[in-house]
Amino acid sequence: MRDDRYCSHEETRPVSPILSAVITVGALLGAGWCLLMLTMKGPKGQKVLLGALGLLELVMLAQTVLGIVRVTGAHRHIATGTFVGYLLGSLLILPAAGWWSLAERSRWGVGVLLVGCLVVPVLVVRMNQIWSGYGA
């Protein structure tokens, strides 16, 4: 059980609040774009969306590198394996969903991409919980 009286504000902050916010907002915007494409006939603009999600993947790669550096440099009482697993696993979600959406030529290919975009913010929230020591 964690005793918050002895935790500094620095210990409860996310690994990088700015990167977490950018990833969350970018993924939710991607999900909104996917939802819009699902209402249209055919996946118009899918390649542009995949390019934008590619940029989001680069931000997620930066978060992964920063997270691994911070977890190896800090003497924190967190579940390091779980945290690094979430970092590395989050890098696989968007490429897998993008590949699947390109392989599936129906509207449901965009639906898979929508689910992938919605999974990313959940993973970011969970990583921040693990980093702060809650739910680890």
Image (cartoon, rainbow, N blue to C red):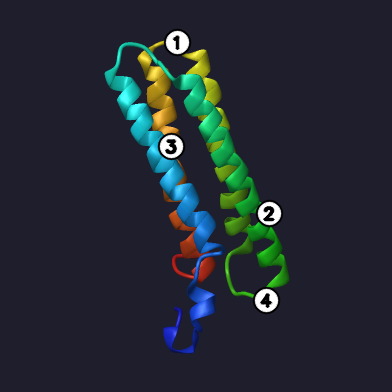
Q: Could you tell which of marks 3 and 2 lies nearer the N-terminus? A: 2
Q: Residue at x 37, y 24 (%)?
A: 111
Q: Could you tell which of marks 1 and 2 lies nearer the N-terminus? A: 2
Q: Could you tell which of marks 4 and 2 lies nearer the N-terminus? A: 2
Q: Could you tell which of marks 3 and 1 lies nearer the N-terminus? A: 1
Q: Looking at the image, is 97 positioned above or below residue 15?
A: above
Q: Secondary structure at mark 3?
A: helix
The reply to whether the C-beta atoms of the residues labelled 3 and 1 are less than 8 Å apart is no
**Label 2, residues with CA under 10 Å away: few <14, some 14-19, many ≥20:** some
Q: Secondary structure at mark 1?
A: loop
Q: Could you tell which of marks 4 and 1 lies nearer the N-terminus? A: 4
* Horizontal side of residue 3 vs 66, given as left or right: left
Instruction: Identify the residue position indicated by label 4 in the image.
Output: 75
Q: Could you tell which of marks 4 and 3 lies nearer the N-terminus? A: 4
Disc marking residue 105: 1
Task: Pick the residue in front: 86 or 54.
Answer: 54
Q: Amino acid at mark 3?
A: Cys
The reply to whether the C-beta atoms of the residues labelled 3 and 2 are less than 8 Å apart is no
Task: Pick the residue in front: 107 or 6.
Answer: 107
Q: Amino acid at mark 1?
A: Arg
Cα separation, mark 4 vs mark 1, equals 48 Å
Q: Residue at x 51, y 17 (%)?
A: 102
Q: Secondary structure at mark 2?
A: helix
Q: Percent x, y for residue 99?
A: 55, 22
Cα separation, mark 4 vs mark 3, equals 32 Å
- In the image, farthest residue toward the left: 39
The reply to whether the C-beta atoms of the residues labelled 4 and 2 are less than 8 Å apart is no
